[in-house]
Image: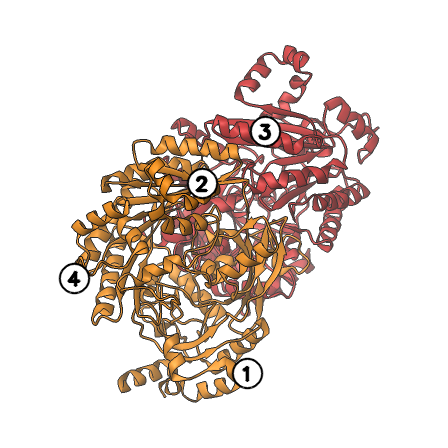
Chain colours: A red, B orange
Amino acid sequence: MIHVMRFGDRLETALHQWREIIGSENVVTGAEPLAAAGTATFSTDHIVTAVLRPGTRAEVQECVRIANRSRIPIYPVSTGKNWGYGSKAPPADACLMELHRLDRIIDFNEKLAYVTIEPGVTQIQLYDFLKGRKAKLWIDATGAGLDTSIVGNTLERGFGHTPYGDHFANVCGMEVVLADGQIADTGFSRFPAAKAGPVYRWGVGPSLDGLFSQSNLGIVTRMTIWLMPAPEYFQAFFFRCDREADLPGLLDALRPLRMNGTLRSSMHIANDYKVVSSIQRYPWEEMGGATPLRPELMATLRKKLKCGVWNGSGALYGTTAQVKEARRLVRNALRGRVNKLQFLDDNKLRVAARFAKPYSAMTGWDLSRTLKLVRPVFGLMKGIPTSQPLESCYWRKTSAPKKMDIDCDGCGLLWCAPIAPLEGTHAVAISEIAHRILPAHGFEPMISLALLTERTIGCVISISYDRDVEGEDEKALHCYEQLLRELNNDGYFPYRLGIQSMAQMNGASGYNTVLRRLKHALDPHGIISPGRYYPGPNLNSQFPEGDQDIVAERAEIAEKR
Amino acid sequence: MIHVMRFGDRLETALHQWREIIGSENVVTGAEPLAAAGTATFSTDHIVTAVLRPGTRAEVQECVRIANRSRIPIYPVSTGKNWGYGSKAPPADACLMELHRLDRIIDFNEKLAYVTIEPGVTQIQLYDFLKGRKAKLWIDATGAGLDTSIVGNTLERGFGHTPYGDHFANVCGMEVVLADGQIADTGFSRFPAAKAGPVYRWGVGPSLDGLFSQSNLGIVTRMTIWLMPAPEYFQAFFFRCDREADLPGLLDALRPLRMNGTLRSSMHIANDYKVVSSIQRYPWEEMGGATPLRPELMATLRKKLKCGVWNGSGALYGTTAQVKEARRLVRNALRGRVNKLQFLDDNKLRVAARFAKPYSAMTGWDLSRTLKLVRPVFGLMKGIPTSQPLESCYWRKTSAPKKMDIDCDGCGLLWCAPIAPLEGTHAVAISEIAHRILPAHGFEPMISLALLTERTIGCVISISYDRDVEGEDEKALHCYEQLLRELNNDGYFPYRLGIQSMAQMNGASGYNTVLRRLKHALDPHGIISPGRYYPGPNLNSQFPEGDQDIVAERAEIAEKR
């Protein structure tokens, strides 16, 4: 068995000890589940040697201690649904540690609008929890599905659709298990008596939160998430641009509104390819089985689906008067820049659903056709999680199954997410790179832009393909590499990395010197998530001296393969 | 000379090398300037052995390398005006490194609203810079005076009065000199080509910014500060509460407005003692020379000065309609809870200044008397720096000099700044502790509360006294210690520490384990700011093995004293 060979007797010893701590049923070593655990939405190189499923923080600590003593690397994930970035597959051979059994909502304060949760708490779990308590609080959800971890997404610094969209900016008080099994609490939470632990981010002294995001320096087993008070009134708006050339003017017109707080949320703008992939599957018939999608056919699809070259959605939050004034400002800013600017609130949506046809005749806006698309987007802007966007992962398939498992269904998906200053020229530059590179490799240039913060665009470029088609895995990774390289060359760096792209962390900068020193100080045997958000030059170099046996062993295994 | 004894020959060697690098004129060793450098607004224990004034980042690096080789601790400050927390005096014997000569504004982008600045850039310098360019951008200023460093305050996580009041939440892209002289850039700034370096906080991989705030892990020589776009319309508001019992209801009424974004800035609420100290000096005559101020006399002063037991100031930012709606919401929330709610804009202020007397007759609001107080507060809410609040440091003196130097003028000032959840009960609890402890030690309970973030109160309790009165230094420190202890016992921990209170960092928590490991990893010889935001049990314990000679030497000196 490869996984036994991989770390030799040390692994056997560790497995034995782990079984004693968390029970055999929570230490998985079967070939099939291990293969599944190492499967993502693109091809992966590394071996999952076992899966550990601790159920409590104490069990996490004990498992880590065993790993540390045995020098067996572990790769902790929350629920592991890190779609497009590697799912739960590790960037170096390791035992997967799944934390989904740590799923407690530990603290809840409606007045101060926060919850303290464990890594296994999912979007839908927290949403239902608040709904069950009739709390007037909203979460910020991503479109990654109902069952994804909130802590996991936050630690990856993911973003959503409400004013609390920059997830990592809205948390505090982390509990971290270190490589030696010790617990460290961040912020004021390190003082057990501190009343401001769940509400104040910085604490006193150096602020450590950032260290444990996009990191392999510790395992976060708890954090406090701030929630948004439900506004008195909510109104979404949608618009489209019919020409690519409208994009820069649009962004430059929106920037002042984002910067002055009129637009409080990270509104999203998706291009035609992105929108079409969320409504239907690849038009195999029209394309006669060929890929990528011809621009001429996309033009036809745009007409048919009433979709623009760029399609925006945003929302306004506040009292009726606050929203009214924001609407006026949005209308003014977008006048002459977009088509079909439509405002939509809960009432209108209800009426539209009930009277879709007469409404469409009355307003000229074909709601019935777009309702399927609009409803989840509308919901996301209110923090209602949805799995609908996941269907787009089946773009190159003929259909999406009812029960989606995008890792195991052979969906191909790579996400590349550069950040740019919030200026039209940068959006154009990124769009041009995507349009140049993706089709050249046989993929559609699917792009979405979020007004992530007051000053930035967070861009997500999707490479969406069918893993079951031979050669596509390789083509997709090659495309990704070139895309990332060109983006970097032009100054656009990703805010988040897939397991295949951790080399982005390389370079001889002082930042990396610091990171290497911190890793050595906190995890001298390199047992937590080797290679994750860690500079190379090669993954093994992070194993400090004394662990050269691992390096040697790895070379040996590689030979035998 | 004590400073030569302190570090023996090593210091002599270092001084020689420093002089070669930055010139003799920038290496100060005279007894008088060293004594001044070690003087704060309360009594200090530690020796400044030399003052270094590098003029460039390269000089900082070279000076640090020399210090590291020579094992001479250095204590970097920006402009060193850390009033109430120790000014530029070190918490352990060290050479002071002043960075005020690094005063360049390196980058400026009006569209994206940021500047990249060095530690020597002062509030007034940046304010004048923007004014000179007619930029429609506001800084967030503190009341600590015109010549204080923006970087210094931000690294201490200070706060101001505009929507950008939580300073550390509005910066990114730090340049840090490490103990070995290497440079590390944080966020995307570590990639020289990255266009989002000055606009996106997190970068990719672990985010290090927090590590270098309230810290002794590195020396920040550059950072990008985000600026607030000047709003179309600005309106301040002022109110007072005439009964202590009004406080909790007031805060609970304001919380929803702060949380839903109607109140975008950290509005401030000051008690009577705090307000009176900013208008006049201690009423020695009425008190017959006795201290502390009798509550009965305070009641008289309140009447005379038209000041409440609690006095609030806040501001509304936006379009005319946005401000109008916010005003309606503020009015509703405060109805029946406060007295004399007054809204004030630039126009009204101009008119008031011109027609103070008739205006007062017309409205019943005695503007002429309060204008002197109102104008700087009004200005601060627009990011206009002022030195006016510094006059309150002369509270127990007979008058404030024109040219204030509060360290050398014998002003006594200790600030204790606990953070609490934004709920009325907590404000009451903190106020009660201050009212119990300060008068018992002979001081007035001066308190200000800021709605620092959506969920927190940032409280500042001032112990204001006259250092020239014998015994007062000791009494004040004793008072401070008891105050901090009682606040901690009740769960209120300070967001910031004075050099006399770094013991707050103590405790056997995992956080401290991490901090010790990080310090050892980044500064193995403990040469940067020994003792600053660093856990004890005693300051010398942070010198790792091999530096025991410093410990021994220290004991020897203590004996000789």
Question: To which chain does the residue with label 2 belong?
Answer: B
Between circles 2 and 1, the one closer to the viewer is 2
Q: Using the numbered discs, state the Cα–Cα distance from disc 4 to disc 2 in whole angstroms.
A: 41 Å
Mark 1 crowdedness (10 Å alpha carbons): few <14, some 14-19, many ≥20: some
Name the residue tied to disc 2: B348
Between circles 4 and 1, the one closer to the viewer is 4
Tell me the element at label 3. Answer: helix
Name the residue tied to disc 4: B290
Name the residue tied to disc 3: A328
* Type of the residue with mark 3: Arg
User: Foreground: B283 or B253?
Assistant: B283
Mark 3 crowdedness (10 Å alpha carbons): few <14, some 14-19, many ≥20: few
The answer to whether dots 3 and 4 both sit on one chain is no
Image point 69% across, 55% down: which residue?
Answer: A561
Percent x, y of residue A432? 77, 44
Question: To which chain does the residue with label 4 belong?
Answer: B
Image height check: is A84 above or below A206? above
> In the picture provided, is A422 more to the left or to the right than B209?
right
The answer to whether dots 3 and 1 both sit on one chain is no
Residue A16 visible? The answer is yes
* Type of the residue with mark 2: Lys
* In the image, farthest residue toward the top: A358
Between circles 3 and 4, the one closer to the viewer is 4
Image point 58% across, 36% down: which residue?
Answer: A144
Name the residue tied to disc 1: B23
Residue A83 visible? The answer is no
Percent x, y of residue B469? 22, 70
